[in-house]
Image: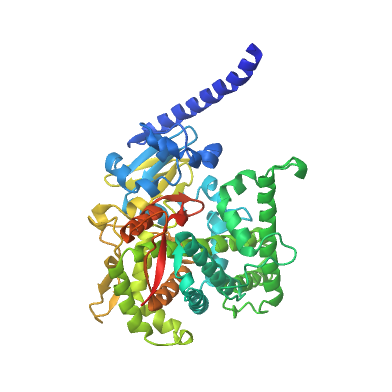
Amino acid sequence: MAFWTTLIVLPLVVLTAFRSWGLLRNYLKARKLGIPIVITPVSWHDTVWGLFADRFRWIRNFPFSWWYEISLFSFAQRQRHLPHQKYGDVYVVVSPRANYIMLNDPQASLEVQSHYKNWTKPEPVYEIFTALGDNLIADNGEDWQRQRRIVNPAFREQNYKLVWEESLRQAQQWLDGRHEQSSRRATMLDVRKDMVLIALHVLSGAGFGQIHDFSSGLRDTPPGHIKSFPDALMFLLMNMFRVVVFRNVRLPKFLMPTYIQDLKDTVQDFGLYLREIVAYNRATTQGGGGGQNADIVSALVEADEAAKREAKKPGLGARAKPTHLTDDEMYGNLFLFNLAGFETTSNALTYTFPFLAANNEVQDWVGEEIDSVLQDKAVQDLDYETVFPSLVRCMAVMHETLRIFGPIANNARWPAGESQVLCTGDRDIVVPAGTYVMTNLYGLHSDPRWWGPDSLEWKPQRWIMLDPETGKETLAPPPPGAAYIPWAVGPRVCPGKKFSQVEFVAVIAMLLRSYRLKPLVIEGKMKTEEQAKQALIDVMYDTMTRVTVSMRHPENAGVVFLDR
């Protein structure tokens, strides 16, 4: 009996001692920063806690549960700017594994996000995006600069025109399916599925040059694959953290748990999709690398092939480092485009539906602009160059939705070299290597000091101003002193920023051109429209993080499509 007791207790004692020493060591480091300290016994740096923390949400119901919120990577989703009212615009969270500074200072945040050489992407955070290879979002230094030179030119006006046309076409086909009375009611789960499919089809057309109708195409599983393209992508998205944890597991199949085998099989299956796409584009690419094709992959492959040819020119000599993308980087960047290209836009669209359904005056306001700009033109006559820039209120809707529900709650950096100086307020903080600096995006975007007393209200009108020269409405900048960075900022700004804007505006314009939204009264869950409206709000704010922010229970609320 004593042997078994020792066998169980001894590892626990060793683990407790090890973590206590880690906590003490990090606490002593944090004291040197000279800023408020918050301590948590576990954090998102702990792999096991990261896998299972969501199952312990019941801890919130007990006193002294503050540490649970802080231990989550996404705790800013719920807390927003509130912790900073207690601890200040900059404080440090101490855990046994690492220290991380929470930052709610607009100017300091812009400095950290912009100075990419001083503040780099932490590998432990961004390795989640490298399941199929290194890419633009995860790399730093010369590797990132080389990838940016090749990737950025693929996002251009020629491509945005294709995004516009394909978004209009997909939205029209989707709404045609909603025209029947039986299809006028949709839960937010239905809406999310529809927005995901629209975004995937737009990405397929404008990203990969493969056009599909809304009602068919990507749902099919082609020969040689185990899942359809969207099913494989969604599976990886839902299990990204597990993919990172288990991707290096090496066991015979008969010893491997089914869910780990499914993870590994899906990674391989999706990798096969990407290899097929690249192989096709390499076989059909323009010989001169002139980028004549509008879709992103064709342009990316052409730019990469051009870089290879440039490196082989006489007189350049042997290069120690490649000037083009490696195969793994090509697949890694395509994987990133798939995740970012559909997840962020489909999420922004999904979160906009409850806001619209709960705010009739905004629907009227945006509809007024849509009627004026689109008039009675056919879809094919809605010209990108003239129509898109005129839909300023639609863009304001996107800006306001992303202000409140941006794709990520925090943006992580850490100092390059041994240390960096963080200038915030009236103090300079020397941040040592290995200390995370977490820009609290949800705090920056909701703090009433910069956004006013209505900072938590959804008001797209705050983004509109009159151009003093033309008298026309134009998009307003953030309020003085505020920082608005849902797409990041500086050299590492999201290359797909305008891609997402064009797609969002096209879908919202088509939606509000023909329909109004109102809250759905779900039988058995609510009785009145006011209760349905509250259910929409509750569903929006009950969030979780997969790779980006999403609704935990979208099936608990919905919308009704009414003719305008």
Which quadrant of the figure contains the N terminus? Answer: top right
Q: How many tags in the picture?
A: 0
Q: Position of residue 64 (x, y in %)?
A: 36, 31
Quarter of the figure with residue 245: top right
Which residue is the extreme one toward the top? 2
Looking at the rendering, in which quadrant would you find the C terminus?
bottom left
Q: Is residue 390 above or below residue 155?
A: below
**How far across and down, in percent of the image, does residue 196 sit?**
52, 64
Residue at x-position 59% and y-position 71%: 204
- The residue drawn where x is 54% and y is 64% is 148
Q: Quadrant of residue 486?
A: bottom left
Left/right of residue 287 with respect to residue 416 in the rendered view: right
Taking depth in this image into account, of 99 and 552 the one nearest to the observer is 552
> Looking at this view, is 39 or 454 the one in front?
454
Colour treatment of the image: rainbow
Q: Is residue 403 left or right of residue 85?
A: right
Identity of the residue drawn at 58% across and 73% down: 215
User: Does residue 290 appear in this view?
Assistant: yes
Q: Nearer the viewer, residue 155 or 85?
A: 85
- Dividing the picture into quarters, in which one does residue 5 lie? top right
Q: Position of residue 31 (x, y in %)?
A: 37, 32
Q: Tell me if 465 is positioned left or right of 558 in this view.
A: left
Vertical relation: 280 (above or below) 449: below
Residue 323 shows in the view: no
**Residue 13 place in picture, x, y as percent:** 55, 20
